[in-house]
């Protein structure tokens, strides 16, 4: 269990240092300190903290922040409860991200990216979403096997979920592309499960592990939420 002394005055930098130094997590300390940081998030607003930001003070001032930067009814603002989250720093250099080999850090980045895709935060081309579905099918169902039709059926179903959830997008909170997201959703919903879909999924699913595409979140996460 991690303990922080003098919590009200603890800065984002101090808390992040305590997290990456945790033996229980077993992270590459130097790399994790560059890749991750603290966010304060709620259904209304998500803010990446600066190194000198004090989470306790930010929580005390949360109502003013959501009134200034958020978009919600008075009732929702009144009930809004933020939480402190350790996740990807949006200012991580693409060159650094592409060189990451540490398995635990890659797993954290992958799960965060998957969550954002499924919640419509990463508007993407249909082919890219199918590729992600294939990668996830391999992770959950194992190596591709054409003879096991049930696996292909499950992979198709999962990839449909990836495409549809990403197309539907979020229903509340901050804007994520607005008109572009709606246009992408309309295009995706008009498509049917055809031979191109199946062939593309099979190709992504059956790719060798060493050929597994890197998910470059730096290319698709462009929100300016740093305060």
Image: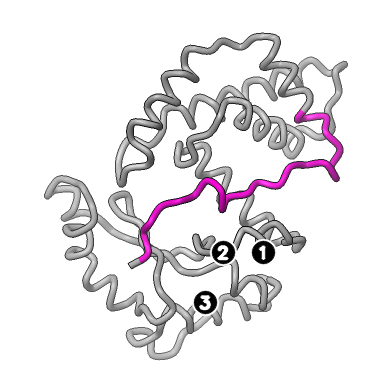
Which quadrant holds the N terminus?
bottom right
Q: Which residue is mark 1?
A: 96
Q: For residue 67: magenta?
A: no
Q: Position of residue 156 (x, y in %)?
A: 66, 20
Q: Residues under labels 2 and 3: Cα distance?
A: 15 Å
Q: Are marks 1 and 2 in contact (CB under 8 Å)?
A: yes
Residue 16 marker = 3
Residue 211: say if magenta. yes
Q: Is residue 141 above or below residue 91?
A: above
Q: Earlier in the sequence, mark 2 or mark 3?
A: 3
User: How far apart are the two marked residues, 1 and 2, measured between alpha carbons?
Assistant: 7 Å
| Mark number displayed over residue 115 | none
What is the basis of the colouring in this image?
one colour
- Helix, strand or loop for disc 1: helix
Relative placement, left or right, of 211 versus 109 is right
The residue sitting at 59% across, 67% down in the picture is: 35
Q: Position of residue 34 (x, y in %)?
A: 59, 72
Residue nearest the viewer, comparing 102 with 211: 211
Disc number lying in front (2 or 3): 2
Quadrant in which the C terminus is drawn? bottom left
Secondary structure beneath label 2: loop
Q: Viewer-proximal residue, 202 or 149?
A: 202
Q: Is 17 drawn above or below residue 41 in the view shown? A: below
Label 1, label 3: how far apart the Cα atoms are: 19 Å
> Which segment is the magenta one?
204-226
Which residue corresponds to mark 2?
A: 92
Mark 2, residues whose alpha carbon is within 10 Å: few (<14), some, or many (≥20)?
some
Is residue 208 toward the left or the right of residue 64 in the image?
right
- Image position of 89 with respect to 167: above or below: below
In the image, residue 15 lies at what x, y percent?
48, 79
**Lower position in the chain sequence, tag 1 or tag 3:** 3
């Amino acid at each position: 269990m991690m303990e922080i002394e003098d919590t009200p005055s603890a800065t984002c930098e101090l808390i992040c240092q305590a997290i990456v130094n945790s033996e229980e997590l077993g992270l590459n300390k130097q790399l994790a300190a560059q890749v991750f940081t603290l966010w304060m998030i709620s259904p209304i607003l998500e803010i990446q903290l600066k190194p000198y930001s004090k989470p306790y003070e930010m929580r005390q001032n949360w109502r003013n922040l959501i009134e200034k930067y958020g978009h919600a009814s008075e009732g929702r603002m009144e009930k809004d409860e933020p939480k402190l989250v350790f996740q990807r720093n949006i200012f991580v250099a693409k060159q650094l991200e592409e060189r990451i080999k540490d398995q635990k850090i890659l797993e954290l980045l992958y799960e965060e990216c998957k969550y954002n895709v499924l919640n419509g935060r990463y508007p993407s081309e249909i082919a890219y979403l199918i590729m992600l579905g294939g990668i996830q099918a391999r992770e959950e169902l194992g190596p591709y096997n054409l003879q096991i039709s049930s696996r292909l059926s499950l992979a198709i179903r999962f990839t449909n979920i990836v495409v549809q959830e990403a197309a539907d997008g979020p229903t509340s909170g901050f804007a994520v592309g607005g008109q572009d997201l709606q246009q992408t959703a309309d295009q995706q919903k008009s498509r049917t499960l055809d031979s191109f879909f199946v062939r593309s999924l099979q190709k992504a699913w059956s790719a060798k592990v060493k050929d597994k595409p890197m998910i470059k979140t730096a290319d698709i996460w462009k929100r300016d939420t740093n305060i």
